[in-house]
């Protein structure tokens, strides 16, 4: 669970390659040229290998619009619809270590609704990141994030009463998992976490009836001072 310097170097390299590769795909002229999900997968594979990664650390998830509500949509076969948001949940592998980064991006100016749901996910992620520090107990953290998510879902008009079941209808997965040799690495979910642990932070909101699925995921190292977001360099703008 506690990563040694050589492990952190491999992880950072995997994260940097993932970051640089996604930035390449997000160049506006290239991004609007894609017609199908698999074209992004093809280019991403090329970008990972071109930068020296072994390849994908896990089956990449590239999902437009409503398909992003399928959490592990790995077929990546569908045509990209006009005005759909695009979720990319991907990671390069370097020296057997996995990156795991998700960005949601709009290829055209987003609708006010898409932007407000995106901003809600971003607000929950910002809050969750403030909680990640040595001593954190993932079960308590998850409960705190759930409360914050409930406030956002109420503001979005999606739920009236915020309780576990209503919140999890729109946010049906955990906020964090361990990251390392495996994308869902082994780790102790029941004890306070020490410095040197790397976890993801990946809240999302999924509204199939509106054709909206949004997730934002970063990779976070617990440090003596709190945490360091290893994937900080990658833009979190919905549209540029
Ligand atoms: N990257 C996919 C997942 O965390 O499940
Ligand atoms: Mn993940």
Image (cartoon, rainbow, N blue to C red):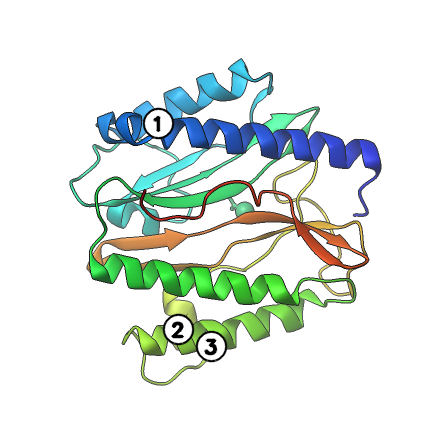
Give x and y (percent) for residue 219. 61, 46
Residue furthest bottom as drawn = 161
Crowdedness of circle 1 by 10 Å Cα count: few (<14), some, many (20+)? many
Circle number at residue 152: 2
Residue, x 62% and y 30% (percent of image)?
Answer: 14
Residue closest to the eye, 132 or 37: 132
Residues tagged 1 and 2 counted as in contact (Cβ below 8 A): no
Crowdedness of circle 2 by 10 Å Cα count: few (<14), some, many (20+)? many
Q: Disc 1 or 2, which lies upstream in sequence?
A: 1
Residue closest to the eye, 193 or 121: 121
Circle number at residue 89: none
Cα separation, mark 1 vs mark 2, equals: 31 Å
Residue closest to the eye, 157 or 112: 112
Q: Nearer the viewer, mark 3 or mark 2?
A: 2
Q: Quadrant of residue 191?
A: bottom right
Cα separation, mark 3 vs mark 2, equals: 14 Å
Residue furthest left as drawn = 82
Q: Quadrant of residue 206?
A: bottom left
Residue, x 41% and y 82% (percent of image)?
Answer: 162
Q: Disc 1 or 3, which lies upstream in sequence?
A: 1
Residue, x 61% and y 40% (percent of image)?
Answer: 183
Residue closest to the eye, 151 or 38: 151
Relative to 61, 85 lies left or right: left
Relative to 10, 99 lies left or right: left
Tag 1 residue: 40
Tag 3 residue: 164
Vertical placement of residue 212 versus 7, above or below: below
């Amino acid at each position: 669970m506690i990563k040694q310097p050589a492990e952190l170097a491999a992880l950072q390299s995997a994260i940097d390659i993932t970051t640089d590769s996604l930035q390449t795909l997000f160049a506006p002229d290239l991004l609007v040229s894609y017609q199908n999900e698999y074209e992004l997968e093809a280019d991403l594979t090329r970008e990972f290998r071109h930068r020296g990664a072994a390849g994908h650390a896990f089956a990449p998830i590239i999902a437009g619009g409503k398909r992003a509500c399928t959490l592990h949509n790995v077929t990546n076969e569908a045509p990209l619809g006009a005005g759909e948001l695009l979720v990319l949940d991907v990671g390069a592998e370097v020296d057997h270590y996995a990156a795991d980064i998700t960005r949601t991006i709009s290829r055209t100016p987003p609708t006010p609704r898409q932007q407000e749901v995106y901003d809600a996910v971003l607000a929950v992620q910002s809050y969750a990141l403030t909680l990640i520090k040595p001593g954190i107990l993932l079960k308590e953290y998850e409960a705190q994030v759930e409360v914050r998510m409930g406030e956002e879902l109420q503001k979005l008009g999606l739920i009236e009463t915020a309780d576990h079941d209503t919140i999890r209808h729109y946010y049906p997965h955990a906020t964090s998992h361990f990251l390392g040799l495996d994308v869902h690495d082994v780790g102790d979910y029941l004890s306070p976490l020490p410095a040197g642990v790397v976890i993801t932070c990946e809240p999302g909101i999924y509204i199939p009836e509106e054709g909206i699925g949004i997730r934002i995921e970063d990779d976070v190292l617990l440090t003596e001072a709190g945490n360091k977001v290893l994937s900080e360099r990658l833009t979190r703008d919905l549209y540029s």
